[in-house]
Structures are given as C-alpha cells and as structure tokens.
Amino acid sequence: MYQCHIENFNIIISEIILAHKWIFMPGDGTNSYANGRGIYGITFVLSGTAQYNVGGKYYEMHKGEIAFIPAHLAYIVRNVSNDQYYHFTANFQIIPDESSKPVMDIINSNAPCVFKVKNEMMYHNLIERLTSVWVEKKPGYKMLSMSILYELLYEYFKEYMMQNLNTGLVEKIEPAKSYIDTYLTRDTSLEELALMCGMSVTGFRRAYKSIYGISPIKYQTGLRIQNARDLLHFNVHTVDEISQLCGFDDSNYFSRLFKKYTGLSPSQFKKV
C-alpha cells in the first residue's frame, strides 16, 4: 500500500498527447508498450475485462475500474474475456514539480495503480466531455481539454488517497485539525491538541504526520505563511502588521521564517 497524504497533492501537465475511447475484441490487445510508454496515462474501463502483463506480473481491469499508468511502465494488454474490452485512455506528459511529491509513489510506481471507482457516472461524464472536446478540436480545445483532464486526475488522486487512508484515524485527529484551521493565529501546544483527540502527544504527532505528511505545528506554520503571502500581495499592511495578523508576535522571527519558506524576505516578496 502506498503512503499518500490527503492534502497538498498536485501535478503539472505540460501536454495532452491523446484522449480517446477504444475497443479490443476478445483475444485482441496490443504489444505497443512492451518496451515502455514514455508518456503518462489514465485508463477507465467502460465494459469488459483486460489483462495487463507488467514484467511477468498480471493485473486484470474490469468495468468501473480506473488506473494511472506511469510513463516508465512497460506492459502488454490483452482482452481475456468473451466480450469486447471498451475503455477510455488519455495520454499526457507531466512536469516534475515540488508540489507533486505527495503523489510521486503513484507516478513512479512499477505497477498500474488500479481501483474500483465509487461514482461511475461522474467519471463517465468527465470522460465523455474530454473525448468530445478532444475529437471535435474546436478553437481553444487544448485549453478546455487540459482543464477537464485536471478535474479527472484530481478525482482519481483524491479517491485513491481516501481509499488508502485509515479513515478511523482521520476522524480521531479531526478535532485538532479543525481547531488549527479555525483558530490559526492562536498558539496551541501539542499537549493541548493531543488532549482534544484523547491521545498521547507521541501518538497524536505520529498519527497527524501519517495522515497529512507533516507535523501539526509545521502544518499551522505553513498556513500562517500562506496567509502572510496573500496579505503581502494586497500591499495594504506593513510587514509588522502582517506579522501580528498571522499570529507572529515577533516580526523579526516572522521575517526569518517567511524567507525560510519562500526564499524571499517579506519586503522582497511585496515587490514581486
């Protein structure tokens, strides 16, 4: 099971290569990717069953299942049922980016990341829209296709992560996270946060990081810095005022921390 966090996941798509629906009749398939793809893909099964041979390991995909196909993956696909294998595929390129880290386990996997979707109709609608826009190629189709593919990938990654999370643990630490989000400028100790969840400090810290990929204090600090960035863009308040508004009593400490997170001092950031 991949360790995926439920916040701050992102990918940057540089180009869509193809978006289409395709049929393999019983016994048909393709060896086109036996030496690797070189492009990323997402596949959704509309009907039938196919077998994917990935380096001698076999994976089956059935109606209502979706898979992310990493660019480096070499495989052979074959319809192993008595019915037609009808599926949608979009192929695209991704630009590596710092914000992609939470989903890199999926992107760099040595196997297709497959699961049964909960809302087939939603995926059907997205696929119909993307396929139609891509095939018709009206003015602006590349921009519109990109936006629909982003929505499709967002739903895929969100659902994949939720299926691989300990939902009981998410609910257990929710009081602390909700408190941080609501009272962002208040300084709250780990002991207080752990008490809200009925957990020991050690257990709470470990649980929080396993779910969100970051400690609760760093999570709070990151939100404060993001809030400071937004306020600096408006260019209404002084740096000292923004420091106070974001929960930092010491503006010098705020400036050092801001530069650590952004690479720029608050004054420099205001000029960007």
Image: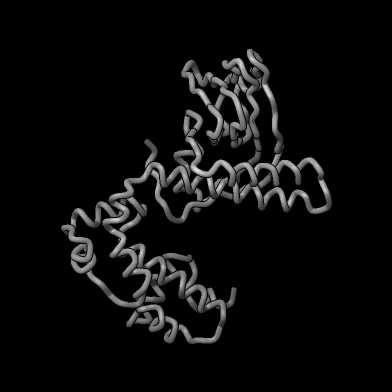
**Which residue lies at the image location 61% right of the left edge and 28% below the top edge?**
47
- Percent x, y of residue 9: 48, 52
Q: Which of these two is toward me, 30 or 47? A: 47
Looking at the picture, the colour scheme in use is one colour
Q: Quadrant of the N terminus?
A: top left
- Percent x, y of residue 259: 44, 69
**Which residue lies at the image location 55% right of the left edge and 46% below the top edge?**
96
- Percent x, y of residue 266: 48, 76
Q: Farthest residue in the left direction?
A: 200
Q: Quadrant of the C terminus?
A: bottom right
Does 34 appear above or below 13?
above
In which quadrant of the rendered view does residue 220 lie? bottom left
In which quadrant of the rendered view does residue 192 lie? bottom left
- Percent x, y of residue 137: 81, 45
**Which residue lies at the image location 59% right of the left edge and 37% below the top edge?**
42
In this picture, residue 102 sits left or right of residue 84: left
Does 152 appear above or below 76?
below
Q: Farthest residue in the top direction?
A: 27
